[in-house]
Each structure stands twice: as structure tokens, then as C-alpha cells.
């Protein structure tokens, strides 16, 4: 059995997409775990997205995610049903959950896998970026159950379809939380997800003023894309709250235009899956040119307006 | 509050790491090492707590397969009172569970404490599992992704940065807190602090000193390969007399790639 869980519903659906492929290859069943309060109605959606079974744990005490209660439920489920593989969503809450589950079960955990496959010996092979983007590690497990964590938007969810599946209500002894939530303040999260963008026009330290992002906005608009940025513009200059890169968003657009971006390895790790990368930079020795398909050595303040005009001509 | 334990990893400085272009292997032998950035944030936070409430002993614990004294001197210069280096060549292949086990046994041997502070993840392997595993082994309350802490009596109030919210939690000590890089800007020790630190003690323990069970150090993960990613990029330079000419050539190339248009 392959068991899938994330406290984020959308991420569970994405993992079911990949889980279905692996379960079919290994001729085993795919189960989703659904934990919360009044969450029954989501069970059918999990089946429609590929689950053969849904383990439902519905209890008022489970209204909010807290690690010990959720951990104890997953631990009982795993010791009862003995899945060989467990996929957990790699979120800020999910990763500690996976790590502690793996510790309680004295087993291995491979975090933040961006590729999963089954090799000729039917082993689960996980790939993850490591050494700050300098390397990709391919790993497998020596012990079972094997636990891997999957970041959001790594895999595609399946098209929902009517299929049969079983919903199993599971009752577990719930461990008490050792922490008390005093307050939860929702964050303003932008509605558009940069991971979904087909085109990203991105800026780095070569951009002199925040207002100059208008140059990129215009270009993004013509290309029907979005504007991105590097970590220094967020962390050091505080112009943005998010960034593209290893520690931020990992993107996979058809076209990535890097403007005034030097190309440190942590940034490059976040754009590795782009189909075409264009780099515009004043410094001909900037490392970004090593990982770009098309490089322009020049001042972005001259190139971008010209590019805008050329694109307008082409696209209209 | 009497004692804070900070877990420090001696990590490879990934910004200085070199790759052998013919084999795509990382050249880790002789690579520069330093305290993992996130752990430095944890240490800085411990020092700030001490500065606020006073009379707190700060101990650091490091698991290493080779000598880490040079980087531990920096931790002592920053303000740690004593460093514990758990070193054994047999630690070379331990994974996250083994590392957490060694840390847990070392912390048990050290004795009573109020807080364990860890970095959320490490600079080189970037797994982010060890602090959670340690909390589980020590049966401690754990608060992760912490970007702000304050000590209030026998409890800690911690602010967690989640994907879509900021969660404030209260936890009674003893507890384990793992911090993000947002939490602070670690200090750079002055020459005076560096000189003072040379008198501080670095305690070295081996696997035998901790009576570690060998089978608990066995890796649960098999690393099949670690290679620099292939860069199969075209690396075409677009040149021209004017910005306009360059832009037009670039657009033409992008049309041929089929990445323009909706």
C-alpha cells in the first residue's frame, strides 16, 4: 500500500497523481488519509483523484493541525495497515510530522523529493536538490516503511473521474498536543501562483530601484506572464516578500527571462525546470550565462524597452 | 531558566563548493567548512535570551566525523560558554536518524536543560529533519519554523512562519525550538571576544563515551548518486549593434523555440 497525507488538501491531490502512477507500477493500492473535523465531504474528491481507499479520522479535537495529535493518528494508521510507502506533503507543518513519524517508526525519511520513480528492482528512487543547489542526490531506502516528503506543486493532480473506492472510518487514540496555539494570523498570499506561470520575467540586483519593476511588469503583461525576483531583492532590499530559488519558489515556466540576475547557484536551482532561459546582464562573466539558452550582455535599461517593442511587433 | 543547549552542525560552505566538470562529482575533500547558517541563528537567539534574562549557561553540541574545533571556536567567541564535540570516524555515514540519536544521547549525558535551540535545516544537506527527530527521541515539545521567541516564566512564546499564516504558540519548558533565518542577524565576534573564547572549554566525546549502540547508527537511506545537475543549455550569445537589433534577434530565437504566443 502507498499512503498519502498532507494537511493541505490540494497537495494531497497532487501526491495522489504521482502515487497512482507508482501504485500501478508496483501493483499495489493507493490510500489517502483525511484528518480533521467535518471533512467527510472531501473523501469522495480523494477517490476521484486516484485513491482506492480513504482513511477518515473526523474528530472535533482535530479541527486545527497540531503535531502530536496528527502524529499519533498517522502512527496508528501505519502500524495497523502497514503501508510500504508513505508520502507526506512537505509543508512547514508536514515536514516535522514526517520526520517524527519516521523517528517513531525508526525508519528513513527523504525530504523534499522533486522526482520519484521506481527502478528495475522495484525500489522507490527519490531525487532531491542538495548542497545549496550544487547537486542532485538520488536516494533510496534501506528500511520500510519508506517515508518521502513532497513539496507543493511538484506533481500534477489527475483529472477527476468517477471511480470506486472505499471510505474507512478510523478511530485512534489521540495524543494530546504539547503546545498551545494562542493566535493565528492569516497572511496575505498572492492569489496568482508563480509556479503556474508560463512566462516569468525576473529581476535581480541589477535592478536599481523598486519602481523599475514597471519595466518588467510591462514585458510580463505582453507575454501574459508574471514578474519574479531573486532572494536579495526580498531579504536585503525588502522590495518583495517572496522569491524564486532553492529556498523560495521553484518554477517551471516555458520561458524565464532573468534580468540583472547574477545567477548564484541557489537561484539557478529554482529555475532548473524552465524550458528556455534568457539572461540579460551587464557583466559578461555573470554565471547566469552558463545556465542560459540565450544570453544578452547589455544594460537591462536599454534592452528591456527594445525587447518590449520587438515583442509588440511580433505578437500583435 | 538555567541552561540552553544549541545544536551546531559543521557544514560544507556550499558557496565555495567546486564541481569536477568531467565527472559532475562534488569536490568535498578539503572543502571549506563553517557553522551552518541556520544554526548560527539559533546560537545568536540563545545569546540574546541570555542577555535579556541573565544567568543562563549556553552549551553547544556538535556531531562530527572529523575535527570541528576551528568552527566551534567561533561559536565560543560569539558567546557560547562551552562546546561539546561528539566526534567519531564511525559517524561519517550516519543519516538524519543516526545524527539525532547521537545528539539525544549527548544531551542526556549533559543533563538538565530548559531549552534546546536548533536551526530549521542545514546549509549543505538541507534536509531539515534532525531537529524534529531529536524532539521525538527526547520526547520534548517541539516548535518549528520559529521566527520570534520570548521567554515568559517557565514558558516560551514562539511565532511560527507558516505558508499562509503566522501562528503564535505557547510551550512549557523544557522544549525544543527550531528557528528560521528571519529570526535575527548573528553577531560577528570582536577580536576581544575571540581572545576571551580561547580560554573556554571544548569537550570531546567519542561514540564509546556515550555508549552508543552501533546498530542505531546504521543509515536507513542509501545514497545512490550525488551529481551536479546537467546544464544542457544552449548558451547562445545574442549580439548586435543596437539594443533594437539584439531585441529583434532574441524575439526571432524565441519564436523558433515556440515559447512565445498564448
Image: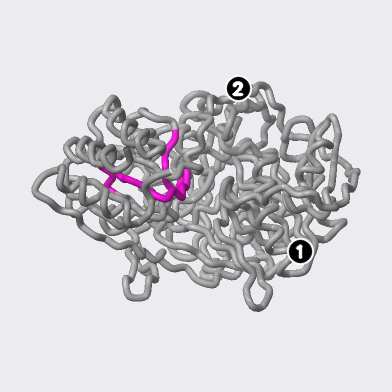
Q: Residues within 10 Å of mark 2 (few under 14, many from 20)?
A: few
Report the Cα–Cα distance between label 1 and label 2: 37 Å
Foreground pick, A285 / A197: A197
Is residue B150 something that shows in the picture?
A: yes
Foreground pick, B208 / A93: A93
Q: Which residues are magenta?
A: A242-262
Q: Residues within 10 Å of mark 1 (few under 14, many from 20)?
A: some
Find out whether residue B74 is within the magenta segment: no
| Residue A72 at x, y percent in the picture | 80, 45
Q: Determine which residue is flagged by label 1.
A: A84
| Residue A63 at x, y percent in the picture | 78, 30
Which image quadrant: the N terminus of chain A?
bottom right
| Residue located 58% across and 27% down the image | B166
| Residue located 70% across and 40% down the image | A9
Q: Determine which residue is flagged by label 2.
A: A185
Is residue B138 something that shows in the picture?
A: no
Amino acid at each position: 500500500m502507498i499512503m498519502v497525507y498532507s494537511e493541505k488538501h490540494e497537495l494531497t491531490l497532487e501526491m495522489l497523481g504521482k502515487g497512482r502512477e507508482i501504485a500501478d507500477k508496483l501493483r499495489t493500492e493507493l490510500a489517502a488519509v483525511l484528518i480533521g473535523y467535518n471533512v467527510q465531504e472531501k473523501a469522495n474528491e480523494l477517490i476521484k483523484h486516484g485513491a482506492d481507499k480513504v482513511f477518515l479520522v473526523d474528530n472535533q479535537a482535530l479541527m486545527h493541525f497540531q503535531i502530536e495529535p496528527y502524529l499519533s493518528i498517522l502512527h496508528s494508521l501505519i502500524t495497523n495497515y502497514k503501508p510500504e510507502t508513505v508520502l507526506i506533503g512537505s509543508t512547514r507543518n508536514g515536514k516535522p510530522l514526517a520526520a517524527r513519524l519516521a523517528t517513531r517508526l525508526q525508519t528513513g525519511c527523504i525530504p523534499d523529493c522533486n522526482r520519484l520513480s521506481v527502478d528495475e528492482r522495484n525500489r522507490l528512487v527519490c531525487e532531491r536538490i542538495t548542497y545549496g543547489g550544487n547537486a542532485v542526490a538520488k536516494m533510496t531506502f534501506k528500511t520500510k516503511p519508506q517515508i518521502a516528503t513532497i513539496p507543493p506543486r511538484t506533481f500534477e493532480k489527475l483529472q477527476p473521474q468517477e471511480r470506486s473506492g472505499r471510505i474507512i472510518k478510523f478511530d485512534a487514540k489521540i495524543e494530546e498536543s504539547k503546545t498551545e496555539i494562542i493566535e493565528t494570523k492569516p497572511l496575505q498570499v498572492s492569489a496568482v501562483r508563480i509556479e503556474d506561470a508560463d512566462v516569468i520575467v525576473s529581476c535581480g540586483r541589477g535592478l536599481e530601484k523598486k519602481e523599475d519593476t514597471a519595466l518588467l511588469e510591462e514585458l510580463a503583461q505582453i507575454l501574459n506572464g508574471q514578474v519574479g525576483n531573486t532572494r536579495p531583492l526580498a531579504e536585503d532590499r525588502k522590495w518583495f516578500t517572496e522569491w524564486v530559488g532553492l529556498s523560495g519558489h521553484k518554477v517551471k515556466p516555458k520561458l524565464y527571462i532573468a534580468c540583472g540576475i547574477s545567477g548564484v547557484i541557489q537561484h539557478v536551482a529554482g529555475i532548473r525546470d524552465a524550458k528556455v532561459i534568457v539572461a540579460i546582464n551587464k557583466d559578461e562573466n555573470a554565471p547566469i550565462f552558463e545556465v542560459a539558452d540565450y544570453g544578452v550582455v547589455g544594460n537591462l535599461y536599454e534592452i528591456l524597452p527594445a525587447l518590449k517593442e520587438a515583442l509588440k511587433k511580433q505578437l500583435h | 531558566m538555567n541552561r540552553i543547549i544549541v545544536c551546531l552542525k559543521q557544514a560544507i560552505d556550499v558557496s565555495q563548493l567546486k564541481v569536477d566538470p568531467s565527472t559532475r562529482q562534488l569536490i568535498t575533500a578539503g572543502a571549506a567548512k563553517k557553522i551552518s547558517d541556520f544554526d548560527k541563528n539559533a546560537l545568536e537567539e540563545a545569546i540574546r535570551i541570555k542577555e535579556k534574562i541573565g544567568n543562563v549557561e549556553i552549551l553547544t553540541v556538535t556531531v562530527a566525523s572529523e575535527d570541528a574545533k576551528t568552527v566551534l571556536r567561533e561559536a565560543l567567541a560569539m558567546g557560547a560558554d562551552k562546546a561539546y564535540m561528539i566526534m567519531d570516524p564511525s559517524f561519517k555515514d550516519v543519516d538524519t536518524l543516526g545524527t539525532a540519536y547521537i545528539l539525544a544521547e549527548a544531551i542526556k549525558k549533559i543533563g538538565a536543560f530548559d531549552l534546546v535551540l536548533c536551526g530549521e535545516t542545514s546549509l549543505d544537506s538541507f534536509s531539515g529533519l534532525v531537529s524534529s527527530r531529536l524532539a521525538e527521541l527526547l520526547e520534548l515539545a517541539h516548535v518549528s519554523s520559529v521566527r520570534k521567541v520570548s521567554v515568559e516564566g517557565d514558558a516560551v512564546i514562539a511565532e511560527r512562519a507558516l505558508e499562509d499564516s503566522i501562528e503564535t504558540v505557547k510551550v512549557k519548558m523544557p522544549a525544543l525550538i527550531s528557528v528560521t533565518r528571519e529570526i535575527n542577524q548573528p553577531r560577528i565576534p570582536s577580536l576581544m571576544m575571540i581572545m576571551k573564547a580561547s580560554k573556554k572549554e571544548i569537550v570531546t566525546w567519542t561514540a564509546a563515551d556515550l555508549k552508543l549502540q552501533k546498530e542505531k547508527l546504521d543509515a536507513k537511506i542509501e545514497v545512490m548518486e550525488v551529481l551536479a545537475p546537467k546544464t544542457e543549455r544552449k548558451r547562445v550569445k545574442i549580439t548586435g549593434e543596437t539594443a533594437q537589433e539584439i531585441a529583434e534577434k532574441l524575439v526571432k530565437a524565441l519564436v523558433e523555440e515556440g515559447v512565445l504566443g498564448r
